[in-house]
Amino acid sequence: MTTISGQGIIADDHPLALGVIGDNGFHPHAIRAVEEADVLLYVGCKMGSVSTIKWTLPSPKEGRKILQIDLDPELLANNFNNTLSVAGDAKLVFADLVTLLKGQVAARTPSDWLNDLNADRARFWIEAEAMLRSDDTPLKPQRVIAALNKRLPSPAIVISDAGTPTPHITRYLKLGGNGSRFIIPRAYGGLGYAIPALVGAHEARPDARLVGLFGDGSLGMSAGELETLARLKIPAVMIHFNNSCFGWIKVLQLLHAKSKFYSVDFTPGSPAKVAEGFGIKSRQVTTAEELEAGLDEAFASNEPFFLDVISESEVDQIPPVYKWLKIVEENKKA
């Protein structure tokens, strides 16, 4: 299992890659794996509020062993009573483990438990198929991610802002390994990150295909950086989720303020024309057919390409955020 910041360290279709844990875009089978495990090894994970769903995952279990490896000794055993804490660089610690365990590793035969977890994973994707194939308008974010998956090469660097795209990407994005990574400003959740981050990603990884995803709230905070991408001819596919609102905040107002929405809605505007004004090829996308054609054109381009996708608002279908879905479930029971 990985946190959302660790997605990409193993190919998402690998039989040992059980998915994302935590609050945002979690996989139910990954949550189940953490809850049922007798031993949990956390590597480079501070076990903060998101990955542990406000320190409730894993729940207390008699005899469970928790091991943690982290470069920063101050993060060790901060939030859970660890059985063993190891301060060190993850790569170097694992190199030592390979040496120490040489000749002692058990045969790599999948256990019944792992097979059962993978059966859960298979059911999850079958049940998600209807949303991933939906041609409804406004387009569902899930549909956008599914279309992206069909075209995403390896290696790829997928960068997201912290708002609207996050839970949908972490739940439905499929990275193919080979150095592919998902990058998100998780520590502070800063909006406006994705567009300028594409410049840095290109300088660091010119071999990787770049994709940036962001909402309209984020775009308003960094639209000027479109000029930088145009001037430097950064070959990035930019996907803008245009739902005319600060979606994340609007859901919070829906769930905690009884739909008393305040200062979260705005006009959709014409972001594609803004991108064109900076000299970037762009398309507005309103239908599934336009989405497929737009992505084909964007991935065929070797220059920055901007897709303005008119998408469904989060309040129309609550995104896969664990604590939000729990509130919805509790409200239904009430």
Image (cartoon, rainbow, N blue to C red):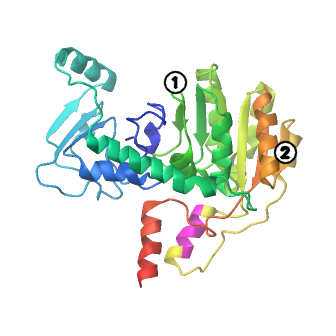
**Location of mark 1 (residue):** 179
Label 2 sits on what residue type? Arg
Q: Residue, x 79% and y 61% (percent of image)?
A: 268
Q: Is residue 98 positioned above or below 324 on the image?
A: above
Q: Distance between the residues labelled 1 and 2?
A: 29 Å
Taking the image as drawn, is residue 247 in sight? yes
**Location of mark 2 (residue):** 283
**Quadrant containing the N terminus in the rendered view:** top left
Q: Is mark 2 on a helix, strand or loop?
A: strand
Q: Residue, x 34% and y 40% (percent of image)?
A: 45
Q: Is residue 172 positioned above or below 305 on the image?
A: below
Using residue 262 as the reference point, say whether residue 59 is left or right of it. left
Taking the image as drawn, is residue 79 in sight? no
Label 1 sits on what residue type? Gly
Residue 101 percent location from the top left of the image: 18, 19
Q: Give the range drawn in magenta.
A: 248-254
Residue 30 percent location from the top left of the image: 37, 48
Q: Residue, x 21% and y 14% (percent of image)?
A: 99
